[in-house]
Amino acid sequence: MSEDARAGGGWSRRRFVGAVAGAALPASAACGTPPATRTPEAPAERGSPTAAGRPSGPRPLYVGTYTSVEGGGTGIGLATYDPATGRITGTGTLTGVTDPSYLAVHPDGRTLYAVNEREDGAVTAVRPADRKVLGSRGTGGAAPCHLSVHPSGRWLLSANYTSGSVAVHPIESSGALGERTDLVTHSTPAPGPGQDGPHAHQVVTSPDGRHVLAVDLGTDTVHSYLLDQRKGTLREVGQAHTRPGAGPRHLTFHPGGRYAYLANEVDNTVAVCAYDPPTGRLTIGEPQPTGTGGGTNYPAQILVTADGAYAFLANRGHNSLARYAVEGDGARLRLLGTVAVAGDFPRQIAFSPDGRLLFAANQRSGSVSVFHVDGASGGLRLAGEPFASPVAVCALPL
């Protein structure tokens, strides 16, 4: 089977990697019926603080999936979770959104955005409060796989995997998306070993909001762009290169803003990167282990705790979460060990807003695992049985 995306929303390399090795995809299943007395997915219903400052009552959880694969979902999965126990309860499905494989929320919490990871790529805005789809806009490329909202709430950034390009859309006051204001294609450098072209895998804003960084797996490059926040256009100001064949996939900033951590999918490593805020330039450090030993692993995503003390990496082939102590004010990662993810192929991980829970979306097992995070030690403790959700590739807790 080709690793390139096929017409009509068929298999891309990303989906191929998630389904090889005889993985059995779960049968489609409804997520349940939402309670009649409340709409927990609405921002106003997220729960109230307790005396200790911890939210009480159910909070919303959204689950991304593929709708065009066998056993996939029928839209964005809707659920709630208990912030104390981590228990997830399904509340339904938001239909009318095709292949919503990655999700992001507006800073005001009122609008949810999803990629439509298909050959004719698009991004879609939805209003969870009344489950209304606000419309879609084309990304100008194929198989968009990641998106993020600029901290200002004015711009939506998306990465087209197959086309190797980054798109910018304005966000209207209603939360709906306007016509695309920019599309930048990664034309240089040349593809890395074993790659057929550029493959933009992630686009993220720097902590100060000035620069946009795009991680390209196909060219072993992280591109830095200056974002014109008035026009919504990107101007490249730098490139950082991994070693050939590393296949960088996901970048996460340390809260201090001077360092970031890069997960390299192809060569199964992570790297500490120095970041210069005035110029937006990134310097990639030496590759480090993922705690998985030999064999194929495909590390997926790395997270850093809000206090900058610990980092966690999703290891798909190893089906584990690697734990790191962050040292030197962000300059060093020290591997502490790994914890079994209680699922198969953890594609994406996310913290709850208070940082006390970690959610792992397990693509092959069709499940979401939840872990309690020990803020003092960085320890992870499984919070009960994983939640079943068809082809779970993204979990977004609010």
Image (spheres, rainbow, N blue to C red):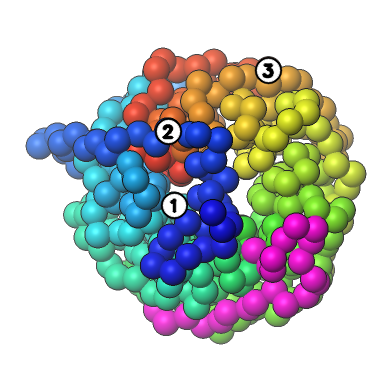
Picture coordinates of residue 30, whole percent (x, y): 22, 37
- Amino acid type of the residue that numbered disc 1 sits on in the rendered structure: Ser
Residue that extends furthest to the left in the rendered view of this protein: 36
Q: Which of 338 and 43 is in front in this view?
A: 338
Q: Quadrant of residue 272?
A: top right
User: Pointer 3: what residue?
Assistant: 377
For the N terminus, give its image quadrant: bottom right
Q: In which quarter of the image is residue 298?
A: top right
Neighbor class of circle 1 (other Cα within 10 Å; few <14, some 14-19, many 20+) is many
User: Pointer 1: what residue?
Assistant: 101
Neighbor class of circle 2 (other Cα within 10 Å; few <14, some 14-19, many 20+) is few
Give the answer, above or below, for where 219 lies relative to 74. Answer: below
For the C terminus, give its image quadrant: top left
Picture coordinates of residue 79, whole percent (x, y): 29, 36
Which element is circle 3 on? loop
- Amino acid type of the residue that numbered disc 2 sits on in the rendered structure: Ala
Q: Disc 2 versus disc 3: distance between alpha carbons?
A: 36 Å
Which element is circle 1 on? loop
Which element is circle 2 on? loop
Picture coordinates of residue 344, whole percent (x, y): 51, 29
User: Foreground mark, 2 or 1?
Assistant: 2
User: Pointer 2: what residue?
Assistant: 24
* Residue shown at 35% from the left, 22% from the top: 87
- Please indicate whether residue 54 sits to the left or right of residue 273 in the image: left
Q: Is residue 299 magenta?
A: no
Mark 2 or 3 closer to N-term?
Answer: 2
Could you tell me if residue 278 is visible in this image? no
Neighbor class of circle 3 (other Cα within 10 Å; few <14, some 14-19, many 20+) is few
Picture coordinates of residue 281, whole percent (x, y): 82, 64
